Amino acid sequence: MTRRSAGKTSWKRMSFAAIGTAAALALTACAGGGTSEPTADGDSIKITVLADVTGPAAFYGEAIKASAEFTVEKINADGGLAGRTIELSVRDTASAASTAASLMNDAILDGTDAVIFGVLTEEALTIAPLAQEAGLPLINVQVGGDGVVETGDAIWRITPPQPNFVPTYAEYIADVVGAKTAAIFYDSDNAATVKVAAEALPAAFDDVGIKVLNSVASTSTETELTTAVTKLLEGNPDFIHVHAIGSQNIAVITQLRRAGFTGTIGGGTAIGAGALSALDDDQANGIIYYSSFVGSRDLPHETGRAFVEAFEEATGEQPNTFHAETYDAFGFIGAAIEASGDSSREGVLTGLAKVAEAGGFAGAQADPITFDNRSAVTPGFVIEWRDGHETLAPGQ
Amino acid sequence: MIDFFTANAPLLRNISVLALLGYSVHLALRAGVFSFATIGFFALSGYLSANLLLAGWAWPVVLALTVVVGFILALLISPVLTRLRHLYLAMATLAFTLFIQSLAFSWDTYTGGAQGLFAVPRVLPIGFMLALVAVVVLLTWATSRGRLGRATAAVRHDELLSASLGVNTNGNQAGAFAASAAVGAAAGFVQVSTTGVFGPENVSFGMVVQSLTVLVVGGALYWAGPLVGAVIIGVLPLYLTNAGNWSLILQAVVVLLIVVYQPDGVIGIVKRAVHWLVRFVRPRSDTSVPDTDTVKAGER
Amino acid sequence: MQYIINGLSLGAIYALFALGLSISWAGLNILNLAHGAVFMAGALTAWWLTTTVPAVPFAVVLVLAVAVCAAIGLLMELLIFRRIRRQSTDEGQQTLATVIATVATSSLLIAIASQITRNQPQGLPQSAFVVESYTVWGVRVTNIQIIILVCAALASWAVAWFIKRSKQGQALRALSVDRDMATLLGVSTDRLSMATMAGAGAMAGLAGVLLAVQTNAVDAHMGEVLLFKAFAIIIIAGVGSIGATVAAAFALAMVETLVAAYWISSMRDVVVFALIMGFLILRPQGIASRAWQRA
């Protein structure tokens, strides 16, 4: 290496290094900073909604975003949350834990009083410790896995864990559907489906006297489903429960019908919220599943009916579970402010605990929604898909 | 200054992990080893660190242990490498990573299965994390120069010729692969000890794609490539956060454009720009041709 | 016995899919990680056509989907692979750039598909293709399964003929044995690449439509899993060998079906990847290594 070329090199290299460092710092400063707004005073409350609007969980994230916007508009028009105007901020976590962590950090630093998050557990596990350390109340929508609310007293879940509804579901199948035998299909590589379909459901069936003929496990990426279908049909069960992820549900249901299965088919919440609209009516009619909410005008509680009516009027769509749960998250915060009289972070925090202790509050999912270890508890409903939308299954 | 760190802590953590992953691939690649095993070592170290930290071990010990385990494991596997070329090596290391992922689902006593491990004590201070990255960057730069750097580059270009010139090709490549594994293991440790979570989503084909993207966007063969790439890839989603699904499309397009039209990555673009600026400022003194991939010892 | 029929039709889809991948790897040294996304594009096109335009004859849907995928393959060659070939300085760098480019293309196609399907799994309307089953000796066979088997047979035969008998096929083989020599002797890499990538795309698209009809599941990520299975098939069989690839495809499908039927389905992935690693370590040229592809 001659001295001359070394000199040229270092000139270029220095300037290049300088540009590089400057650019890097600028990029991180711009993207990471986030808005810095003053903490809410007594007239308003700042709520941030973090949702997976893009990525694999986008369908659910979009519903949460839509419901948040509807809810805030309605509440602010009706006079605010316990008299305070809601300042809403919706950010997309893109189904990525790293993005969620950055956005949660922004929320902590910009004076947010409460955060609502949905839906993936892996993201929730990453952001919950951050929220807990900052004393920022975090209300989770969906987030079915373990360990989230256990992080600390700032972490709540407005969606009842799925195993909650299994006894009601099993009773309905035994009493109203009249099934004596059943087969179960599930994905073994998803914690939520395993908890319900491999553990809670067989136990519940046992309690109501339904005999499980076959329990068929698969992986969520499996395309070879004909074997699984053949096994499910062995012994001609009265009822088949399909608890898979995404497109597998559609595939299994189609093949069951094609194979001539005329019994009742049931599923987990993954087939709810419109996933069944991918099927033709004659394949999908009569399929039942459970959830904490259904967008029906026949709900037994007035707060639920009022929500359905208002939502349908404002958006022209039937609300699904995710819409209702998001609505209830805001309702929960409102009840908290009323209980503690203070809409700051600490006020909401103490208020949530007070509401839970005092027996819950009335929401779209139930009246009242109670809490057990900071997770919501509701009676739940069995839902039937009919003619392209969700209905309250008859006979409950 | 401290404010900057707290305000951007999650972002800095993400960038650190991405940078370490990028360096892991880079170290192997610059010796001509097409290894996609980085994420496999990332996963092994991640789960190991999580289990040890949950059991209460001190984090410096855990870091040292996982790095050493990764290094040794790689050395044990490396005899296999010498037999496979390019695409076959890529396939084998890819299969290794996916095999680890499927193990992660099945071996749930240690890995937590589909749910993964969580509530791991987040004990790594930000200062140490950044220092670790700095050390890796420095070591990469140092080993890219001088005799070792030239030998490595020679092996990458033509194994046969280098061997005939007396370069220890097997040793060089084995060392590169082992270093790659060690850095990958460090990345796994950092991921766990800063976020407290580790699960199968950290071991997916998507992560492999991310580590490659970081490398290629920055500039695959430049010592600063993974760092630049990590900053860009770490920051990009936050800019595009309101674009909806278009953000994913845009990110894919950006990577595609860089790979096809600017294979030297962002550093290559900047170099060309600086070069052009220099010619503009001192038109007659600079007569050299813009860099191609040919080896210029000491210049990378 | 029912399981054997299931395994056969699955194997046919695997064979169709793997053949395209094998040819592009053997002849052009392209590890096309976007092949799965092209497969998905075929299924997606079929879904879009049948749900937007009422009463489309299935033959039209099939032809259009295949054409779309062939076009995607062609575009990839023209915009991406050709450009990389022109500007790369050595084989290693070219290989790396190609692999990463195909990965980026795959991400792009999947992102576009996610946008179109609104991230929800979709199904084909029953009117798109009426599936009828026939029961022969107690075994249920559907008409779609028969079509799949026929298509796969025709395609394999066509590819085998192309490789062995046609001039272009011989040129392709020449390229893979010694690229520089072949080009010196007048083989046009550009034209061959266009034909190969378009053909591979077409076969992937065909497999996509057929699988979509059989399982009635259309989803932006449906190609990913298939991609890795195809790699297993190709490596076990030996890259570039048509007969062995088809045989390995059927073998893998049968093993999967039987494992799912009689054992635990969740071990399937572990087995597949262990197989790939094992073969690459012990016998990288595969079972039927041909002279025209070196490992």
Image (cartoon, grey):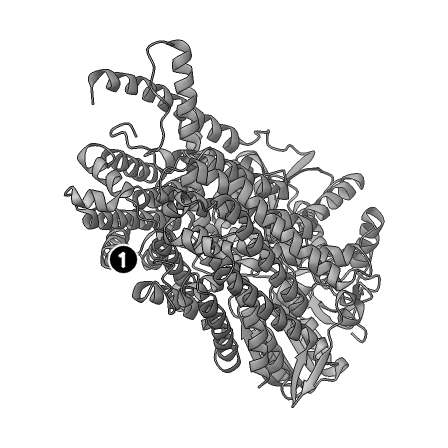
Q: Considering depth in this image, is B46 or B127 the residue closer to the camera?
A: B46
Quadrant holding the N terminus of chain C: bottom right
Instruction: Identify residue type, mark 1.
Output: Arg
Q: Is residue B1 placed above or below B38 in the rendered structure?
A: above
State which quadrant residue A341 falls in.
Answer: top right
Q: Considering depth in this image, is C3 or A350 the residue closer to the camera?
A: C3
**Residue assigned mark 1:** B83
Crowd rating for badge 1 (residues with CA inside 10 Å; few <14, some 14–19, many 20+): some
Query: Looking at the picture, how far across and down is residue B223, in whole percent?
Result: 32, 34
Q: Does residue B183 appear anywhere in the picture?
A: yes
Going 20% across and 50% down the picture, which residue do you hit?
A: B170
State which quadrant residue B100 falls in.
Answer: bottom left
The answer to whether residue B143 is left or right of residue A67 is left
State which quadrant residue B110 falls in.
Answer: bottom left
The answer to whether residue A367 is left or right of residue C39 is right
The answer to whether residue B251 is left or right of residue B232 is right
Q: Secondary structure at mark 1?
A: loop
Q: Considering depth in this image, is C288 or A266 the residue closer to the camera?
A: C288
